[in-house]
Image: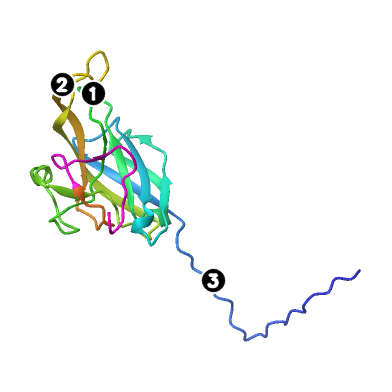
Amino acid sequence: MAAIGLTAVPATADSPPDPVPISAPTHTLVTLNLTGNGCVGCYVRPQQYIPARNNSGKEISWDGQGRKVRGDSITFRVPTENTRGMSFAIFNPAYNDGFYDAEPVIVFQYKGYEPGGRVERSQAIKASSASPCWAGTSKDKVSLDVNVRKVRVEGIKMVDNQPTGGPTPVRVTLAWVAPTEEVFGGFTKTDRGVVAVQDTYPCGKKS
């Protein structure tokens, strides 16, 4: 049986070429440049969670692969559409002098400081509210400088490798983007400048 199809109309000599579509990047290379005390041996994990209540009834979540920092920077290839509301968990296994029942995340903005501003360690520790929720990007490459310090907060003393002792000061990572970036909601109370969570941090304008 013969195939029946449409006959193509040949283009004339003066027909303009079809435009080449320009598409937005589907993935972004995010490089975190770690300064201050540094974070060699730390583990960093990109993640995203926007609850339905913060996003017109549609929940969005994405989990990246955690990786060990082996120098002064670390780069992740992440879906560009998931950078809005993205946060970065950061954990230093060297800080094992006690138990802290939460995982620190990198702060993108301290409340009271405009995006693009510089925040010193003394100011970060005194800040009572902050957000780890990045507003995101449409670029294919982004480089962010992150100050990394250590700070002591109240934790639990370890006894026989179990968190069964009394309250004790423990070391945790204090990390924030410098200069600070615009955020996608998510302001919450800090513990001496540290935002820490037990699960992926919920971002969004109403969080």
Residue at which label 1 appears: 96
Q: Is residue 34 left or right of residue 84?
A: left
Residue 157: give x, y in percent of width and height.
Answer: 18, 21
Q: Nearer the viewer, residue 42 or 35?
A: 42
Cβ atoms at labels 2 and 1 below 8 Å apart: no
* Magenta stretch in the rendered image: 189-207
Identify the residue at image location x=36%, y=53%.
50
Q: CA distance from mark 2 to mark 1?
A: 16 Å
Q: Quadrant of residue 69?
A: top left
For marks 3 and 2 on the same chain, the one whose residue lies earlier in the sequence: 3
Residue at which label 3 appears: 20
Q: Is residue 159 left or right of residue 76?
A: left
Where is the C terminus found, in terms of image quarters? bottom left
Q: How many marks?
A: 3
Membership of 198 in magenta stretch:
yes
By what rule are the colours in the image chosen? Answer: rainbow
Residue 165: give x, y in percent of width and height.
Answer: 18, 19
